[in-house]
Amino acid sequence: MSPVAGVPPAPTLVLPDMDDKTIDLARYRGKVVLVNFWATWCPPCRKEFPSLGRVRKLFKPTEFEVVAVNVGEDPETVFSFAGAPDFPVLFDRDSQAMARWPVKGLPTTLVVDRQGRLALRAVGGREFDDPAIVEQLRELLMPRST
């Protein structure tokens, strides 16, 4: 994953989840959040999806969260592919949220630091439990001395 130049604030992200409950990314402030934009029709998205659950299990839930943002599909389509993952899946049905984020294509993943800033970005498929990515996430979780 590459650093995001300037570490800008993360754009707003308020979307419905699989139960049609509205989730606001701001609720995770204080945690490191991996935000993955994806779709079931995208082969690299499908390939990397299981690693989202694996990387989430490597960190404490009080410090780290994975949020998968499905672009343009309905809950039935996503559920038939993903089942009920142990992390939030949000629905950006009209691609409006994706348009506010620095997403160039699917999959794109951005990591939001504890202060709510965009810290890392990956365009294209990844295995998120790869040791190099896990180390980058660990660095973001380290307390900063001031």
Image (spheres, rainbow, N blue to C red):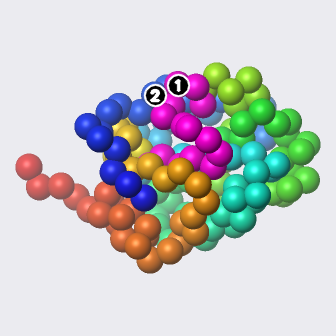
The answer to which image quadrant residue 22 occupies is top right
Residue 102 part of the magenta-drawn span: yes
Q: State the extent of the magenta-drawn residues as a range.
A: 98-111
Instruction: Say which residue appears at 43% left-offset and 67% top-offset.
Output: 133
- Determine crowd level at label 2: few under 14, some 14-19, many 20+ residues with C-alpha closer than 10 A: some
Residue 85 visible: no
Under mark 1, the amino acid is Arg
- Determine crowd level at label 1: few under 14, some 14-19, many 20+ residues with C-alpha closer than 10 A: few
The answer to which image quadrant residue 103 occupies is top right
Q: Nearer the viewer, mark 2 or mark 1?
A: 1
Q: Nearer the viewer, residue 121 or 140?
A: 121
Q: Which mark is residue 100?
A: 1
Instruction: Say which residue appears at 55% left-offset and 29% top-offset.
Output: 13
Residue 101 visible: yes
The answer to which image quadrant residue 77 occupies is top right
Contact, mark 2 vs mark 1 (Cβ under 8 Å): yes
Counting residues from the start of the chain, the first of labels 2 and 1 encountered is 2
**Whole-percent x and y of residue 107?**
63, 49
Q: Residue lying furthest bottom in this view?
A: 131
Residue at which label 2 appears: 11
Q: Residue lying furthest left in this view?
A: 146
Tag 1 secondary structure: helix
Under mark 2, the amino acid is Pro
Structural distance between the alpha carbons of marks 2 and 1: 6 Å
Q: Which mark is residue 6?
A: none
Question: Relative to 118, does residue 138 appear above or below in the rendering?
Answer: below
Question: Relative to 42, does residue 103 appear above or below in the rendering?
Answer: above
Question: Relative to 56, does residue 122 appear above or below in the rendering?
Answer: above
Instruction: Say which residue appears at 48% left-offset and 46% top-offset.
Output: 110
Tag 2 secondary structure: loop
Report whether 80 appears left or right of 4.
Answer: right
